[in-house]
Amino acid sequence: SQTVFQWAETSMAPTAMAVMQLVEAGKIDLNASVTDYVPYFTLQDERFSEITVGQLLSHTSGIPDSGDAMADWENFMPEYDAGATERWVRNDLAMKGLLFAPGEGFEYSDLGYALLGAVIAEASGQTYEQYVNENLFQPLGMDKSTFLLEEVDKGMLATPHVPNAAGEVTVSKTLPYHRPFAATNNLFSNIEDMGKLAQASLNRGTLNGQSILPESAFQQMWEPQSPTPFADYPFGRVYPAPMMIDWGQGWFLGEVDGQSAPNTFGGEQGFQTQTVLAPDVNLAVFAVGNSQATDEYYASDIAVDVMGMLLDNSDR
């Protein structure tokens, strides 16, 4: 359980929690424009000024996903310093347009969540990584979790594996990391720490006497904000289940065996992860792997099937 994996887009859940903490503290208004917090944010579409923080959370901002740009890690030039996020917003993100008017559609966007990292930094006066460490990881005792690659014990880091041109599984030449993508893609953690985050979530914001959020924040994050185009895709080979019916805030909202199941999925070069919660029966399941299997969501299938088995054997 001490092995550290990259949990990829699972980062969106703690990012949403951080935003909700700052909402509770009166430092963020979900209805306010992103430019109120990140004045240097622009896009190649004049409607960028209409985008709200809440629309970033709900994937309804119109900002596109990174798509293939982040898939070619072997030719990508990652950045590691504290100024990387602001440079990315000012330069790379500023070259993007909008797919639709803010609030008028749904597009799962890792770029939108990366921008939330800048919102959190500007609203809190800390870097994204410092804020989440001090306000989520430390209170929950998640001492093996970080968003900074340089803080990871390399002796405990799982080695990513990818298929080569011949289809053979080989060790990846690169590790998928780019500091501006902390809020969407850079979570390094292990099963034990993720269990603490999951239990705090199942408890609606508390763990071992520490409170990170009020119960109302989890009710909001697990409230459907938008249906997704993935609703009909079933995960689980033994217990097929629709896991991406709706998007809440930081979580996909699905069902396993009739139980509400907030969940997060992560897939990046050499890694797959899946977290599935069943809050009504206080269950959480994780599946992680250090291999990228093209078009095979093995982590999701395993997690859903295990959750189905647990639910079948529970005293509901």
Image (cartoon, helix red, strand yellow):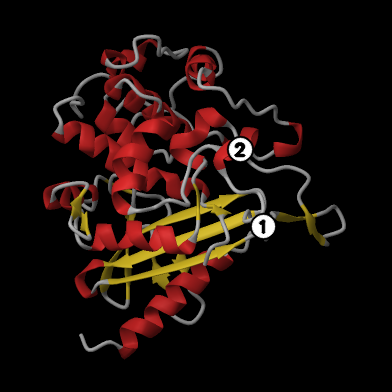
Q: Nearer the viewer, residue 259 or 104?
A: 259
For label 1, count other residues whose C-alpha is less than 10 Å away and answer few (under 14), some (14-19) or many (20+): many
Mark on residue 63? none
Label 2: which residue?
Answer: 177
Residue 289 image offset from top left, x and y in percent: 60, 63
Q: Determine the secondary structure under disc 1.
A: loop
Q: Nearer the viewer, residue 282 or 53?
A: 282
Q: Residue at x 55, y 40 (%)?
A: 151
Q: Earlier in the sequence, mark 2 or mark 1?
A: 2
Q: Amino acid at mark 1?
A: Gln
Up/down of 95 relative to 281, above or below: above
Q: Disc count in the image?
A: 2
Q: Amino acid at mark 2?
A: Tyr
Q: Residue at x 61, y 55 (%)?
A: 271
| Left or right of residue 277, residue 239 in this image | right
Residues at marks 2 and 1 touching, judged by CB atoms closer than 8 Å: no
Q: Which quadrant holds residue 45?
A: top left
Q: Determine the secondary structure under disc 2.
A: loop
Mark 2 or 1, closer to the camera: 2
In which quadrant of the rendered image does the C terminus lie?
bottom left
> Does residue 168 show up?
yes
> Does residue 59 show up?
no
Residue 73 image offset from top left, x and y in percent: 70, 38
Q: List the single residue furthest toward the right.
A: 166
Residue 188 image offset from top left, x and y in percent: 52, 48
Q: Residue at x 64, y 57 (%)?
A: 158
Label 1: which residue?
Answer: 292
Q: Which quadrant holds residue 119?
A: top left
| Left or right of residue 309, residue 253 in this image | left
